[in-house]
Amino acid sequence: MSANPDKLPFSKIVLFAIGQFGWSIAAFAPANLLTFFYLPPEKDIPLFPSYLFQGALFFGLTIIGLINFGGRFFDAITDPIIANLSDRNKSPFGRRKIFLLFSSLPVALFSFLMFFPFHSSISTLNIITLTIAIVFYYLAITAYCTPYYALIAELGHTTEERLNISTAISITWALGFIVGNLVYALIPVFRNQFNINSTRAFQLTLAIFSIIGFIAMIVPVLFIDEKKYTDGKQSDEGLFVSLKSAFTDLNFVRFTISDLTYWISLTFLQIGISYFVVTLLKLDESMPTVLMTLLFLLSFVFYVPINIFAKKFGKKPIMIFAFGLLALVFLTASLLGLLPISQLTQGFLLVVTASMPLAVFGIIPNAIVADIADADGISTGSFKAGIFYAARTFMMKLGISIANLLFPSLLLLGKSIENPFGIRLAGFTAFLFCIIGLLLFLMYNERKILLVIKGTKNG
């Protein structure tokens, strides 16, 4: 590590961003397909057998919802612990890279194993093995992602450089998400090509994703010299002191709570896409893949304009607009199949409208956290980017946990073509969360953060 670190060249930004592609594709199934696999859409011929009890246990909560929530909650708790260990780490290999090295393989392995039930029918052992796989997976993904995101603030030495890195990893995350959505289309392909059932076709797809994900996750470890491109500033604060310091920053608190509402809404879209498209719009099973691929391809159109606009006018205005537009998307989602236009047109209209806010939320939040961490380090003398990103990912994972707990319960109110009430209510619930996020983000004071950073650079 150097007191005067080199600027990260574009080629290295690309190599760093490949790591994001890796964990994006490896994490796609655990984040988006657990409900799809263990509580599949109702059809005449079920796509998968029932491995877990399909009804409600208590208060409308399902087994898969509780397991998923528990895993996410465990994940959220470990975030600040890993972050603090990373912030204080003095490994000569690199205080962040050492975590990336040892977590890559477990991420890939357990993201695959959680979709291998112990029994081929409903069994308590399926609950136990799934819970174990989820716990180890979330421990590994935290050990990779938290130090990885902290590197954004350390590899980028100006707000512009951090925005460029954030843009690059947003692109590769979206590419990983596009590849992940191919699962819906690959199931029938592998099923027919290899004469296997839907479960084995699904598992084969995830095995391929895991291998690709591992290879990509290891790329930053091999090709990014952390000591050359970071200044080596560390934090000696303990876990609780660091957390207290982060959450006494009102700007950061306002941002993270608004971010929580975004992740709840986004997760409703990610785990609900097959229900919105197949049940509400009555389209073919392959259409979720087509529409989600189109969604992310269209979002790429906005990446460069968003980067330019944010540098010129600031990040806050574009975030406010994105929250409002995303709220409109979910309000529309709750009405799919009822609008006076064709089902296919409704689907395309939804993804076209969602593409711009999706691009904004993929780029801007990581850059905002990097700015907040930099301003805090300048003000306090303790540079703890890891703990800020851990706090952000804590809220992100809490949001995903809440969505994974709520969504299956809402489905119990109706997830069939004859009775889609639960699916529609899920769309409207996501709309309400977006409105709450918009109101909270209006209180974020971007000018205060930038004055601290620019004051130091000018001095």
Image: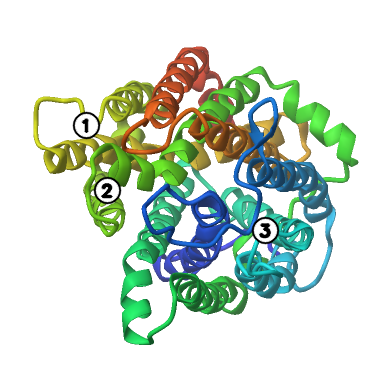
Residue at horizontal 67 percent and vertical 52 percent from the top = 146
Residue furthest front as drawn: 44
Residue at horizontal 71 percent and vertical 57 percent from the top = 134
Examine the rendered structure and indicate whether residue 323 appears above or below residue 277. above
For mark 2, what is the residue? 295
Residue 337: give its label. 1
Q: Where residue 107 sits in the image (x, y, percent)?
A: 65, 67
Q: Where residue 170 sits in the image (x, y, percent)?
A: 42, 52
Say whether residue 206 is visible: yes
Examine the rendered structure and indicate whether residue 209 appears above or below residue 162. below
C-beta proximity under 8 Å, tags 3 and 2: no
How far apart are the alpha carbons under marks 2 and 1? Answer: 19 Å
Q: For the C terminus, give its image quadrant.
A: top right
For mark 3, what is the residue? 122
Residue at horizontal 12 percent and vertical 39 percent from the top = 345
Examine the rendered structure and indicate whether residue 105 appears above or below residue 260. below
Q: For the N terminus, give its image quadrant.
A: bottom right
Marked residue nearer the N-terminal end (3 or 2):
3
Left-right relation of 297 to 205: left
* Crowd around label 3: few <14 · some 14–19 · many ≥20 (10 Å): some
C-beta proximity under 8 Å, tags 1 and 3: no
Q: Where residue 126 sits in the image (x, y, percent)?
A: 72, 61
Left-right relation of 101 to 456: right
Residue 1: give its label. none
Asked where in the image residue 369 lies, by quadrant, the reply is top right
Residue at horizontal 49 percent and vertical 19 percent from the top = 441
